[in-house]
Image (cartoon, rainbow, N blue to C red):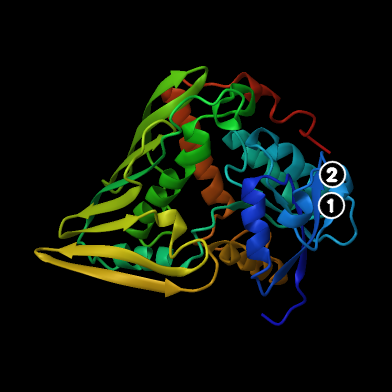
Amino acid sequence: MNKAKLRWGIVGPGEIAKTFAAALRKSDTGMLTAVGTRNPARASLAEDFAGARIVDGYENLLNSTDVDVVYIATPHVNHVEWAIKGLRAGKHVLVEKPVAMTQAGAKRVYEEAKKANRFAGEAFMYRPHPQTRKLMELVRDGAIGTPRIIRSNFGFNAGRILSGHRLFEPSLAGGAILDLGGYPASIVRLLAGAAESLPFLDPELVSGAAHIEGDVDLWSSATLKFSNGIIGELSCSMMAQLDNTLFVFGSAGTIAVRDFWYASGRNGGVGTITLTQADMVSNIEVRDERWLYTFEIDDVARSIHAGNLEFNAPGMSWEDSLGNMGVLDAWRRTAGLHYEIEQDELGNFQEH
């Protein structure tokens, strides 16, 4: 891609922002120029975001003339607010997942992007990776016959409730579903669609259950029913270590992938897809030395340079993103989980 590098700014210098900044240093299409923070005196910022200007305040970052694209890496209760402010400031935006707390919030972001004629996307870093494309190919081409059940989970054990931490804080829409559940939901929808040679497929039915404590879900599961007969089984947890394995069970075999969201690794390497057909087991290796997060960075650049306002498949198009948020909405609703803060998500951003 022989284009000038896009100049990136980051809103919110947390852990995921540090990972993203490291990937930008490896990217051929982007460079980090500025980081917006509410605590510019923090000693670690200069090291964590080496070479970038440290900007006092998110608004000042959005008004910077040396920033083309903004990565929104705040807690997700603030994603809609800062995505819309970024778009209104004339910036393209990549929003860390989930793009919003609700489908309605996500829709508002994409409406604003269309109005501003700027790119907006939800950051699912695994989507453009070659391993994901290989998974889609195996399902689409019938390597395991007709898919019947797709099972995916993402869970870790924090050991105890960490009071005040964003994951356990209802005022920050904490909990497993919103922080972790988007990964299994998105891969199950992707592969259910691949079975029909579609970019994704939304379920007809979502039924969720959760253990709720302190007004957040600590562990949760959901069942999805699709029109093509596929059943999706999703689980996520912050208080139990799950196997973090994707399984696709078909009429003639099984696909299994560990930690599919990391593909061949954060810093590149080899990903393995285990394919079982009758009594034969084969390991399909997907080797790629590029850093994982550079794939979405380069996909943003590709979209912007082509004049597109959204990702192409298998990246999360707006319709795909809205469908995923719809699943998370239904999962929380049927599990009995609601955040008071949801009603404030659209705030003053109805019209402009």
Q: Residue 49 in the image: x percent, y percent? A: 74, 57
Labels 1 and 2 touching (C-beta < 8 A): yes
Does the rendering let one see residue 117?
no
Q: Is residue 251 left or right of residue 16?
A: left
Asked whether the viewer can see residue 125, the reply is yes
Residue 327, compared with residue 135, is above or below; it is above
Mark 2 lies on residue: 40
**Relative vertical location of residue 156 with respect to residue 52 in this rendering, above or below:** above
Give the residue type that dot 2 points to. Answer: Pro
The residue that disc 1 covers is: 54
Residue at the location (89% across, 51% down)? 63
Determine whether, in the image, residue 47 is placed left or right of residue 179: right
Seen from the viewer's position, the closer of residues 134 and 227 is: 134
Q: Residue furthest front?
A: 43
Question: Where, quadrant-wise, is the N terminus in this rendering?
Answer: bottom right
Which of the two discs, 1 and 2, labels the residue nearer the N terminus?
2
State the SS at label 1: strand
- x and y percent of residue 112 in the render? 74, 45
The residues bearing labels 1 and 2 have C-alpha atoms spaced at a distance of 6 Å
Q: Residue at x 43, y 30 (%)?
A: 159
